[in-house]
Image (cartoon, grey):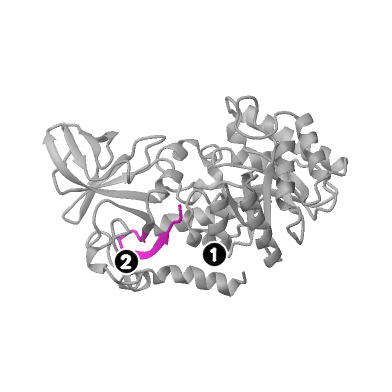
Amino acid sequence: MDAATAAERLAALMAERVDHRFKGLPPDAEGLTLAELTAERRNLFTGGFTTPVLALSAERLEHNLTLMETYAARHGLAFAPHGKTSMAPQLFQRQIEHGAWGITLAAPHQVRVARAFGVRRIFLANELVDAAALRWIAAEQAADPDFRFICYVDSVRGVELMDAALRGRGTSRPMEVVVELGAGEGARTGVRTEADARAVADAVAVAPTLRLVGVAGYEAQVPGASPERVRGWLGRLVGLAAEFDKAGRFAGADEIVVSAGGSEWFDAVADVFATIPELTLPALKLLRSGAYVSHDDVHYSRLTPFNRVPEEGALEPAFRLWAQVVSRPSPDQAFVNAGKRDAAYDLDHPVAHVVRRDGTERPATGIEVTALSDQHLWLHTAPEADVEVGDWIGLGLSHPCTSFDKWQLIPVAEADGTVVDYIRTFF
């Protein structure tokens, strides 16, 4: 797909018409296209939006995109942010405009979404043995010589299944794979030992439909993860790349991919990848952190590497969920009209930040989210809490991945509430 076609498809998202599919949008906007609604620059608080409504901060979103672009460049890293976080092609495009090498994904459906909107470099941070998906990707490669696809392998059986699915399909070029090094016993996917890695590499070498181009893994799965243990595992990954290169296992590759990096340890990735020895081919040091795009108010705010390296900058939580107090049955209790269908809850409860009444915001002093039902958040209200039925509560969320996936369309609002864009998700 050429750039013009990709741009047309992104633009076509704004031709969708506002209707019942999209939570929180103004009922009186029914029938308008998103482009028309955007042009009206409605205010999130006075423009007819209904609660609950999830919004992204325009300023904080841009700040986070710029910060990680700068960080990756400073440390000599290529950046393929994990698209499963947002599944939003508009954000994929903005990430690429901010210097991303490509987009990381985790499942075949996600690859189809990215390809539908013209993403040309995709790193699948997962094993892929589904024959129908493999054949579709091979057809995409045959149709588009600029499309580059890389995925994990971690077993001889998996390599055999991939080769069987691709043989006889008239593939124009081998599918590129990287051996995934597991983070340890009891961790998730990936080979457990270097001997296992060699066996998988040997299997790739005799599969004409595949080409080994590197090694990869996910350091957050290291058991009892600590700076020392994570760096130790990253050292193993770098050592495996050097060993494979010395043994000539990357024959036919143009560069050697060494990839790691979630959103908790990218400082360790940057440090250890800086020690990659000179190889016979250029090294593509590929970082994959994804949660940064929106960041959050609890989980990643605690764990972000920027807490350890504050001189490098700081990410800013860009999500705010607005819900309305619908019941105040006792002095120490209130309920708002958002719940598990609207807010991430798999890691932490939402956090009440502000109360909005009559156009004025004040801190949500004495208000704590204690539980979630499907359509209610349970609030404990201390004596100092000033909250009544009808108030809007602005809530911070934990875990971007399970925040994006509850909303098909997310308004992007400036600090004064002016909505300047709408982000379409595809989960």
- In the image, residue 254 lies at what x, y percent? 80, 55
Q: Secondary structure at mark 1?
A: loop
Against 252, residue 346 (above or below) is above
Question: Disc 1 marks which residue?
Answer: 117
Which quadrant of the view contains residue 367?
top left
Q: Secondary structure at mark 2?
A: loop
Give the position of the N terminus as an image quadrant: bottom right
Relative to the observer, which residue lies in front, 157 or 25? 157
Distance between the alpha carbons at the discs numbered 1 and 2:
21 Å
Which residue is found at the position 54% from the left and 42% from the top?
A: 263
Q: Which residues are magenta?
A: 411-427
Tag 1: amino acid? Phe
- In the image, residue 404 lies at what x, y percent? 42, 50
Relative to the observer, which residue lies in front, 332 or 64? 332
- In the image, residue 184 lies at what x, y percent? 65, 27
Which quadrant of the view contains residue 198?
top right
